[in-house]
């Protein structure tokens, strides 16, 4: 069975659950639910592994009912991938941290992004800072470098170098 067929069947099953058990329009209007949020909930609940990361993590970070555990789980998943997250995902993660009032998590997330750059930190990280800098300033957050997290706190010169 092809990948497209598997994904479309899972997506169809998820959407059919919404159709067979629809919410009345009065419920949607009273709770101010957005149809896009309902589709995001279906996409996230399907746990399709190869769903494009951009849409999957933007949905996870953009959910209003996402708590600290959900955000930390998504950030931990991003840390497990062998790639630097897209700036749109980073911005969505920072907005989720702000919504949860988690300043320390936002700084650690930016620190994780810098560590994910690996040996290309001199080329990739300035681009990330350029793209995300406006959002960081808007949210009142700081980069790890401005807090001094890029230098060890108790570093001493080696006795062999004296």
Image (spheres, helix red, strand yellow):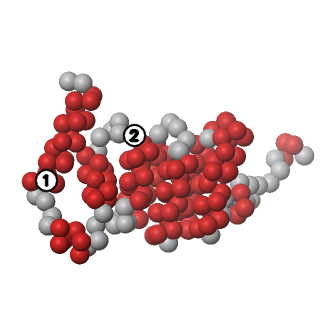
Image quarter of the N terminus: top left
Q: Residue at x 44, y 45 (%)?
A: 54
Please provide percent x and percent y for residue 124: 66, 40
Residue 116 placement, left or right of 48: right
Q: Is residue 68 above or below residue 85?
A: below
Which structural element holds mark 2?
loop
Q: Which residue is mark 2?
A: 52
Circle 2 or circle 1, nearest the eye: 1
Asked whether the viewer can see residue 152, the reply is no
Please provide percent x and percent y for residue 133: 65, 57
Q: Residue at x 18, y 71 (%)?
A: 27
Local crowd size for mark 2, using a 10 Å CA cut-off: few (<14), some (14–19), many (≥20):
few
Q: Which residue is mark 1?
A: 19
**Residue toward you, 90 or 150:** 90
Residue 17 placement, left or right of 32: left
Q: Residue at x 84, y 42 (%)?
A: 160
Please provide percent x and percent y for residue 80: 46, 42
Q: Residue at x 22, y 32 (%)?
A: 6
Residue 69 placement, left or right of 6: right
**Residue toward you, 150 or 38:** 38
């Amino acid at each position: 069975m092809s990948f497209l067929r598997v994904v479309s069947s899972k997506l169809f099953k998820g959407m059919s659950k919404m159709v067979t058990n629809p919410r009345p329009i009065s419920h949607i209007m009273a709770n101010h639910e957005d149809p896009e949020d309902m589709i995001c909930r279906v996409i996230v609940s399907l746990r399709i592994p190869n769903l494009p990361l951009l849409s999957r993590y933007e949905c996870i970070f953009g959910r209003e009912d996402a708590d600290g555990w959900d955000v930390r789980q998504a950030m931990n998943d991003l840390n497990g991938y062998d790639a630097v997250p897209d700036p749109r995902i980073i911005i969505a993660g920072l907005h989720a941290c702000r919504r949860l009032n988690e300043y320390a998590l936002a700084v650690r997330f930016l620190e994780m992004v810098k560590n994910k750059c690996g040996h290309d930190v001199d080329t990739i990280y300035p681009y990330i800072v350029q793209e995300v800098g406006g959002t960081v300033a808007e949210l009142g957050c700081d980069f790890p470098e401005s807090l001094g997290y890029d230098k060890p706190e108790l570093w001493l010169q080696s006795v062999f170098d004296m």
